[in-house]
Image: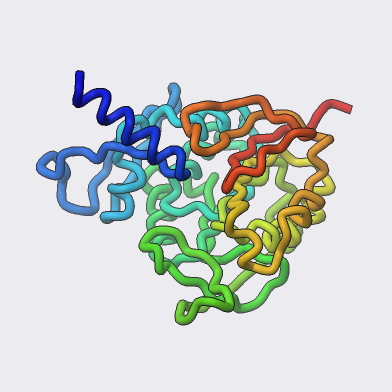
Amino acid sequence: MLIYKTKSLVKKTCRRFGYNLVKLPSQTAVQPFPYVRQYRVRGVVFDFWIADETGLRWYEVDGMEDTQEARALLKLARPKDKVLEIGCHHGFYTMLLAQVVGSEGRVLALEAEAKNALIAQAQAVLNNLGATVMVMHRAGADKSGPLTITTSDGSNAHAVTNIESGGMNVEAVTGDELAETYGPFNLLKIDVEGFEGQVLAGCKEILSTRPKIALELHLAQIEHYGTKVEDVFKLINFADYEGWMIVPPHFDQLVVFDPHNLPRAPGLNLFLKPRHP
């Protein structure tokens, strides 16, 4: 009983500071990298490469098959959807969305870090989804051209700010440019570690069509890139949308989205669909 209370207290403390504590599997049970495991996410089944230590930390964890993010995406996505995913990491939710949209849908996924992009493309090949999924080694931005990124946190790539040094160059592209060639898109998913303002600014034409939106807002990091939170909110007419959100530290709760009372937490996960006219 004491052990249970201690674990509960540690978890609550971590969530108070915006972290979600998860349990890694026993190292003795893990095969050498890379290895494949199968996921069954609320009835959607796909295989997935656990390619390295990062994959182990992010995806080989308790509860990965029933996260609130997965539940929300399954509420949004439908067969035949055309998805633009900017920031796909190792492609976990890319595979989930690809299975949902089916052979008549499409998923175009961007990943700024080269190794992650290779792993995400390997997931598509593993699941015979080459006709449905395209992974591009590109960064999303408000204009095309070279962009410097870093992976100093050991997992996600993010754009280099004026207080950082080093990094690597990657070609950036706007969502609107991609829509001209590969669109139209009716579901826009963005997870770019605080670079949301620039990415959304590059998707103005897409946003004008009122797509479904899955957006991870890193409100504590947005201003590092010279963008104000209010500017980000102006790019999306939230009054036109309904849906759900995850508000840290309550990662295990999916609450109703209220456009008139958006929490100013360090981060928000929004899952939105346009209101009917």
Give percent across and percent down for residue 67.
45, 31
Say above or below: 269 vs 45: below
- Pick the front one: 140 or 37: 140
Locate residue 79: give its quadrant. Answer: top right
Q: Residue at x 32, y 54 (%)?
A: 54
Q: Quadrant of the N terminus?
A: top left
Q: In this image, 172 relative to 131: left or right? A: right
Residue 269 seen from this side: yes
- Pick the front one: 43 or 227: 227
Give percent across and percent down for residue 241.
78, 33
In this view, the residue farthest toward the right is 277
Give percent across and percent down for residue 68.
50, 30
Q: In this image, 202 relative to 39: left or right? A: right
Locate residue 153: give its quadrant. Answer: bottom left
Give percent across and percent down for residue 94.
50, 44
Q: In this image, 182 relative to 62: left or right? A: right
- Pick the front one: 181 or 248: 248
Q: Residue at x 25, y 40 (%)?
A: 24
Q: In this image, 228 relative to 90: left or right? A: right
